[in-house]
Image (cartoon, rainbow, N blue to C red):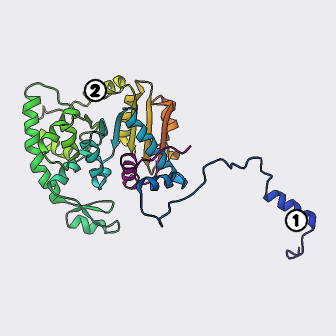
Amino acid sequence: MANHYEQLSEDKIKKAHAANYVQPTMTLDDWVSVQGHDFSKAFDITAFFESLFTTGFQATALAKAVLILKEMKKENVTIFLGFTSNMVSCGVRDVIAYLCKEKLVDVVVTTIGGVEEDLMKCLKPFVLGSYDTPGKYLRDNGINRTGDIFIPNDRYLYFERFMMPFLKRMYEKYTVANKTLTTELFCYELGLAIDDESSIYYWCSKNNIPVFCPAPTDGSIGDMMFFFMQKHPDFTIDVAGDIVSITKIAINAEKTGIIALGGSVPKHHIANANLFREGADYAIYLTTAQEFEGSNAGANIEEAISWGKIKDDAKHIKVVGDAALTFPLLVAGAFQSNLKPKT
């Protein structure tokens, strides 16, 4: 058996050293140095985001996203914001409402959960719970869980009292009058009906920001439509009409930008509309999903470029992380800081 404690020869030591330290041909002395935020100084939001740019990993990706969004606004880009319902379940709903109030986005695309939960919160709030509460206990007590957020069933009862008369009004205004009710019009009418300044859709209606919901039956509103249509089977919502509207917005825009929180139908609906103008000019993806499974949520921007949904010279970034963290930071950086590109 070899003696591992035996002193190595000088030749072997030299070879080991050479293998460990390859002779550098590049020193990168003129590159940006990695450095985090100095919290020993008085807090300054611009300095904080400057430090993210030099921190590395997803912090740097987020800082790059801030710069891209700043450029979108400077260039008066038509911004399409897509998000799934969980963003409205949590407090990101209030960030989105702020953007719509201040007219900082131009088009909204979401799921029906992203519509109904906004309206439900106008009637009664959701509450913080925990991830590990047993499902059976919650079910037995009439409480629904989304992550660590609890939604008691009484919220749905309040919402039903709001929605059933609304559906009746929509039936009379559109179906009986032989007019087409698209999801864009449906969401516009909901924003007018809720009359609550905490609502995303209140501000979308007030500021004429079109809202598209390609899957309007996939939620509580769909359940209510089922019961409503037992008495009014001719009631319909035309989802095909929305394709014309959102695609024309993309085609007629001078420049477009995509902000996608997560994946699902909203992300693809926006990207597909931009296909007809040979791709979006800017794109920011915020997600935890990865591309190895071939999902829409995890698909990287290069995949969208391959389809022609984003231009090959577009300014783009994918930030991997929980959008409940990254999106508020993106908004703070873009609209509250004076972050500038590193030279």
Q: Looking at the rendering, in which quadrant would you find the N terminus?
A: bottom right
Magenta stretch: residue 135 in it?
Answer: no
Residue in front for this viewpoint, 215 or 101: 101
Dividing the picture into quarters, in which one does residue 43 lie? bottom left
**Residue wearing tag 1:** 13
Residue 245, labelled with which disc? 2
Residue positioned 40% across, 28% down in the render: 255
Residue positioned 79% across, 53% down in the render: 22
What is the span of residues highlighted in magenta in the rendered image? 319-343
Where 80 falls versus 287 (above or below)? Answer: above
User: How many numbered marks appear?
Assistant: 2
Residue in front for this viewpoint, 316 or 25: 25
Q: Position of residue 289 (x, y in %)?
A: 46, 49
Residue positioned 35% across, 36% down in the render: 80
Q: Position of residue 129 (x, y in %)?
A: 28, 66
Q: Is residue 108 left or right of residue 176?
A: right
